[in-house]
């Protein structure tokens, strides 16, 4: 019997149900993944007991000699993975990492040119419901109506017109390669800082499966729990000239004590990400996404921008007369976990949406490959075409469960 089963059987039962959900259902949420047992062990380690405000070698608390080692391991491994000059591994989240960057060089009221939430950007890139949209003057850019890809000429025009202090690139629902070099040229042409938020594609970047922004961007932020497959958390990388400003901005600017257990888990995940197996998985993630996208296309679905270069795709459901919200609910009944998503120029609100977002990182971590992806693409198609038919959805659920049991996560 585990400690939690003895101390708190109610919570232990919740864990058991959640484990069962993860093992028996198919996770296609593009921002999710399965952290290894080693990463989870680090999160549950004694490092959770330690206060360590400050940075290695320079703390406001005694007894930090071992947590210093943990943080230095995380920093050194992150530098090696990304080739960054300076890394701060303390942000508790991706949104916090972005906040730290804004606060390091911008003043309230400054102009940020960033991607629209409804066309792929993230809340923390300037949505009116986020601190970022409330503190800064946001000029949004989107995708081209025809290609549904970023239109760099249009972006350049917007930059010249609005003269932003910062340009933000990187997205939560964009399936195409991002041209960081072009972003930097545009930022330089108007004297703006460039922030690349690679939360979604960080794992692909360290495997060289997507170009890296590190040689170009002044700041690079990421979460550590998506394609990077680590613990829930954030990180900032920057050029050496911004190192002091970033460290001050994270602590004491926006955070107090760092979560040393999470930082240790980040270090463990970074070690895993340095391995050849991790790199192979990132290429497989992209191959898998292409197979799901092609299979859905063959079944008559329109893929936004015509396909994918990365780990995710957006499916336009308008011709199937079903909303993203209803498609998400039908998939849930069939044991397929994914999320509704607006598509570019969507007529529906975000909480209804005309599309779904499908991602392959978690399924790839389970070991699934092309054969399973063809099955999955067909299963999504059958589910959406039979959304009102509970008997058919139950049949699909059993097939998905059988598939998941062949590719266990932790058992
Ligand atoms: N940046 C991007 C591009 C994201 O997709 C996300 C999360 O989905 C974040 C930042 C925010 O991360 P967090 O949820 O850790 O605040």
Image (tube, rainbow, N blue to C red):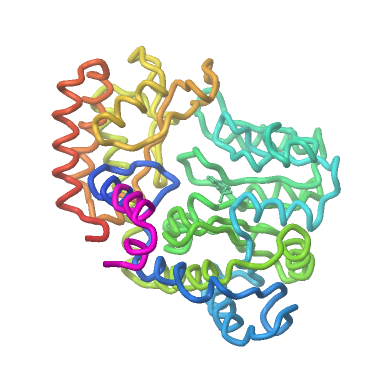
Which is more toward the observer, 347 or 150? 347
Measuring 58% from the left and 76% from the top, which residue is drawn there?
Answer: 71
Question: Left or right of 208: which side holds 373?
Answer: left
Total numbered circles = 0
Left or right: residue 106 versus residue 243 is right
Residue 294: x %, y % from top left: 28, 35
Indicate yes or no whether the magenta region holds residue 9.
yes
In the rendered image, residue 165, in percent from the top left (x then y), is placed at 81, 46
Q: Is residue 17 above or below residue 48?
A: above
In-front residue for pair 296/21: 21
Q: Quadrant of residue 384?
A: top left
User: Which corner quadrant of the image does residue 357 belong to?
Assistant: top left
* x 53%, y 15%: residue: 347
Q: Which residues are magenta?
A: 1-17
Label the magenta part by its dominant secondary structure. helix
Q: Is residue 70 left or right of residue 250?
A: left
Q: Quadrant of the N terminus?
A: bottom left
Q: Position of residue 169 (x, y in %)?
A: 62, 46
32 vs 344, nearest the viewer: 32
């Amino acid at each position: 019997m585990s400690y939690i089963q003895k101390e708190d059987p109610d919570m232990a039962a919740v864990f058991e149900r959640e484990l069962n959900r993860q093992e028996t259902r198919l996770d296609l949420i593009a921002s999710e993944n399965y952290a290894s047992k080693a990463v989870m062990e680090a999160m549950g380690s004694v490092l959770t007991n330690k206060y360590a405000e400050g940075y290695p070698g320079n703390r406001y608390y005694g007894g930090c000699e071992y947590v210093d080692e943990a943080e230095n391991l995380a920093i050194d491994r992150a530098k090696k993975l990304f080739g960054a000059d300076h890394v701060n591994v303390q942000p508790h989240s991706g949104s916090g990492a972005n906040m730290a960057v804004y606060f390091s060089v911008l003043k309230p009221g400054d102009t940020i040119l960033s991607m629209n939430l409804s066309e792929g950007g993230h809340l923390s890139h300037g949505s009116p419901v986020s601190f970022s949209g409330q503190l800064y003057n946001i000029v949004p850019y989107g995708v081209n109506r025809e290609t549904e890809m970023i239109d760099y000429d249009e972006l350049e025009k917007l930059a010249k017109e609005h003269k932003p202090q910062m340009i933000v690139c990187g997205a939560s629902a964009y399936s195409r390669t991002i041209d960081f070099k072009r972003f930097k040229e545009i930022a330089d042409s108007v004297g703006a800082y460039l922030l690349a938020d690679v939360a979604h594609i960080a794992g692909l970047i360290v495997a060289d499966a997507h170009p890296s922004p590190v040689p170009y961007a002044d700041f690079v932020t990421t979460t550590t729990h998506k394609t990077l497959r680590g613990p829930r958390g954030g990180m900032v990388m920057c050029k050496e000239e911004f190192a002091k400003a970033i460290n001050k901005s994270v602590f004491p600017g926006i955070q107090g004590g760092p979560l040393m257990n999470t930082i240790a888990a980040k270090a463990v995940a970074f070690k895993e990400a340095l391995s050849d197996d991790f790199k192979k998985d990132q290429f497989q993630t992209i191959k898998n996404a292409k197979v799901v996208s092609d299979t859905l296309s063959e079944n008559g679905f329109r893929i936004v921008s015509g396909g994918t270069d990365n780990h995710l795709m957006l499916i336009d459901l308008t011709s199937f007369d079903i909303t993203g919200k209803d498609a998400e609910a039908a998939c849930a009944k069939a044991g397929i976990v994914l999320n509704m998503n607006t598509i570019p120029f969507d007529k529906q609100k975000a909480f209804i949406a005309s599309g779904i977002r499908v991602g392959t990182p978690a399924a790839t971590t389970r070991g699934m490959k092309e054969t399973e992806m063809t099955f999955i693409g067909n299963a999504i198609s059958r589910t959406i075409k039979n959304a009102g038919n509970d008997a058919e959805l139950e049949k699909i659920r059993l097939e998905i469960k059988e598939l998941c049991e062949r590719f266990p996560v932790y058992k």
